[in-house]
Image (cartoon, rainbow, N blue to C red):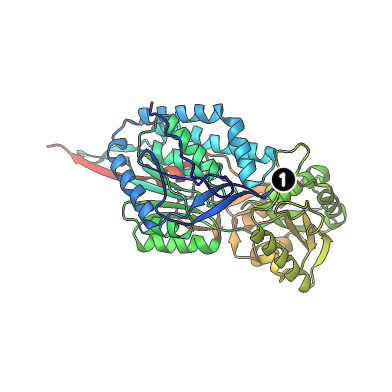
Amino acid sequence: MTAIAEPTSQGTAQGARTLQNFIGGRWVDSSGTDTLPVYNPATEEVLAHVPLSNADDVAAAGRAAREAFKEWSEVPVPERVQSLYRLRTALLDDREALVRQISTENGKIYADAAGEYRRGIEVVEFAIGMPSLIAGYNVETVSRGIDTMLERYPLGVGAAITPFNFPFMVPLWTLPIAIAAGNAFILKPSERTPLSAELIVRLCQEAGIPDGVVNLVHGAADAVQGICADPNIDAVSFVGSARVARIVYEACGRNGKRVQALGGAKNHIIVMPDAVIDRSVENLSESAFGNAGQRCLAGSVMTVVGDAKDTVLPRVVERAEGIRLGFGLDEGVEMGPVIRPDARERIHSLIQQGLDGGAEMLRDGRTAVPDRGFFVGPTVIGIQPDSVLASEELFGPVLSVLKADTIDQAIELMNTSNEYGNAASIFTSSGKAAREFRRGTPAGMIGINVGVAAPVAVFPFSGHRNSFFGDLHVTGRDGVDFFTRKKTTTTRWF
């Protein structure tokens, strides 16, 4: 087993350490000189300082990964999978530290952090099945005396650029699949939440994954640009805003890289008059306000059809008023903060734009918040289809409400009010309505009486329209296809 090299701490005025990159099996200082503070967004405490690495750091990681790939790709698949068994064990053994780290750097409550942890482990377990997932196939006698077979090979070096809102789960969407398939890997976590990624990489080391197979480069825009341009990187997986997803998609395309770029979302939830009220309100509220609305599957627009405006909507407002805010590790807290002050101010600004455009405030969460931390309280606001709140992704605990007379009208509002197609849900007791909804929405992930339609790891995480740029999605068989290349061999013996 590889010895663990502890990251060194560089002193700062606040006493928090400056993080290091992990390249070729060594913890090394970034060549960039600037840093950003990493906050606990619930307390405003500085947890660490993250270096803003540049193209030189990315190039060093690319070279290390390319060199490691030569040997790692020749390791038999069952042996590669043994490394994932050990990684899974290490992740399970450190569960409490990982969950608390997720909560501390992101702000989400303990239960949400534990849920994220479980979903990350799921992908490791899926990737452990790589011996069957990577299998090819053959057809004998495609012509007289001729046979053809298909084989999958590792692609080379993959890189992932991951967001702040799921600092543990999203890195694990790609890392275990990539390395189990025989690739080397570079992780560039969000500069706002890099600490969970550091723990993952340390546990990869503990699991005996060879030097250079997994690398970590901290940073922001310069590091992203370096990844998109580096010639040693063959494939890039990105999760972030739609604007940056498009930039990454186009930059990687120009440089001949395989790319999957997951962008923003504006997810609609339709509530029919026959919805089971208590369960629907519970699920709706969790969808809108869980993780402070900072997830790409959050239900951000609720369309109440017919009498649902009188039965469900008042209960959702009541639930929003009762949600307790605070530090996610404190007992009884039900919702944490948003990630940074600039996120809070953007949410406030968009709410005000909506009000200026004629929206009706049903529950204002902008004021009744803790004195410290970057909080926005649960907000419910009635809007018209042309409101900025119907089209713009807020990434906060704001539920906008539309009214419709029929399901056809509700589906039309959903399909025409925004440019995204990530997820959509319906709450109903009618199979007919559910079928009509499923077939009529352009979203890639559908929930029927499910507020957060997140598929388990065996399925692809599959947004459409401006929620995704690329062909192959993350996780599931799409994830395996993304990190492998196919060869066909046609054989005739004389």
The one nearer the camera, 400 or 311, is 400
The quadrant holding residue 185 is top left
Is residue 407 visible from the viewing direction of this image?
yes
Is residue 118 visible from the viewing direction of this image?
no
Say left or right for 141 vs 162.
left
Location of residue 145 in the rendering, given as x and y in whole percent from the top left corner:
19, 38
Location of residue 269 in the rendering, given as x and y in whole percent from the top left corner:
71, 54
Q: How many numbered discs, if any?
A: 1
Question: Considering only vertical position in the picture, is 117 above or below 305?
Answer: above
- Element at badge 1? loop
What residue is shown at x 53% (from left), y 44% (from top)? Answer: 17
How crowded pointer 1 is (Cα within 10 Å; few <14, some 14-19, many 20+) is rated as: many
Location of residue 308 in the rendering, given as x and y in whole percent from the top left corner:
83, 55
The quadrant holding residue 385 is bottom right
The quadrant holding residue 149 is top left
Question: Considering only vertical position in the picture, is 487 above or below 407?
Answer: above
What residue is shown at x 66% (from left), y 58% (from top)? Answer: 341
Say left or right for 274 vs 339.
right
Q: Which residue does the numbered mark 1 point to in the structure image?
A: 449
What residue is shown at x 56% (from left), y 59% (from top)? Answer: 241
Identified by mark 1, the residue type is: Asn
What residue is shown at x 79% (from left), y 68% (from top)? Answer: 359
Quadrant for the C terminus in the image: top left
The one nearer the camera, 453 or 238, is 238
The one nearer the camera, 338 or 158, is 338
Location of residue 491 in the rendering, given as x and y in whole percent from the top left corner:
20, 40
The one nearer the camera, 351 or 180, is 351
Quadrant for the N terminus in the image: top left
Residue sitting at the far left: 494
